[in-house]
């Protein structure tokens, strides 16, 4: 994510701010806190970088039901269901 400040009179961003707000992990955490409907519809349309973060994030893709959750969780559930019989 880039944070180029092209507005006239805007102060230059500090290196620390660029490092923090330029990380995909922070955007990922924010997007995971949003309602799924917003992530599916509006959030991806804001900019290409946000869309790339959403498409490239395994946790977000799992939350959107586009990718399966790991097999370990499924195996645990099958074992738990089998023990109830």
Image (cartoon, rainbow, N blue to C red):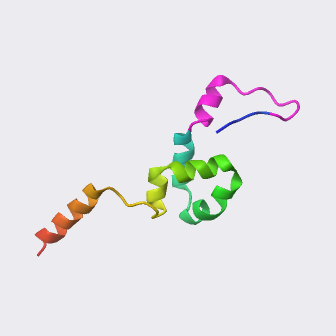
Quarter occupied by the N terminus = top right
Q: Position of residue 75 (x, y in %)?
A: 22, 61
Q: Is residue 52 above or below residue 45?
A: above
Check the image and name the residue furthest to the right. Answer: 8
Check the image and name the residue furthest to the top. Answer: 15
Q: How many labels, in total?
A: 0
Quarter occupied by the C terminus = bottom left
Q: Position of residue 68 (x, y in %)?
A: 38, 61
Magenta residues, as a range?
6-23
Q: Position of residue 45 (x, y in %)?
A: 68, 57
Along the line of sight, the residue nearer the viewer: 70 or 21: 70
> Can you tell which quarter of the image residue 40 is in?
bottom right
Residue in the image at 58% along x and 59% along y: 39
Q: Position of residue 48 (x, y in %)?
A: 67, 49
Along the line of sight, the residue nearer the viewer: 27 or 52: 52
Residue in the image at 80% along x and 27% along y: 11
> Can you tell which quarter of the image residue 80 is in?
bottom left
Q: Is residue 37 magenta?
A: no
Q: Is residue 14 magenta?
A: yes
Main SS of residues in magenta? loop
Residue in the image at 64% along x and 46% along y: 49
Position of 6 with respect to 28 (left or right) is right
Q: Is residue 7 above or below residue 16?
A: below
């Amino acid at each position: 994510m880039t944070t180029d400040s092209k507005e006239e009179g805007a102060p230059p961003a500090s290196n620390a701010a660029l490092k923090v707000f330029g990380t995909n992990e922070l955007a990922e955490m924010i997007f995971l806190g949003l309602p799924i409907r917003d992530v599916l519809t509006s959030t991806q349309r804001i900019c290409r970088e946000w869309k790339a973060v959403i498409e490239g994030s395994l946790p977000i893709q799992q939350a959107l039901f586009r990718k399966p959750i790991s097999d370990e969780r499924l195996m645990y559930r099958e074992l738990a269901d089998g023990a109830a019989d």
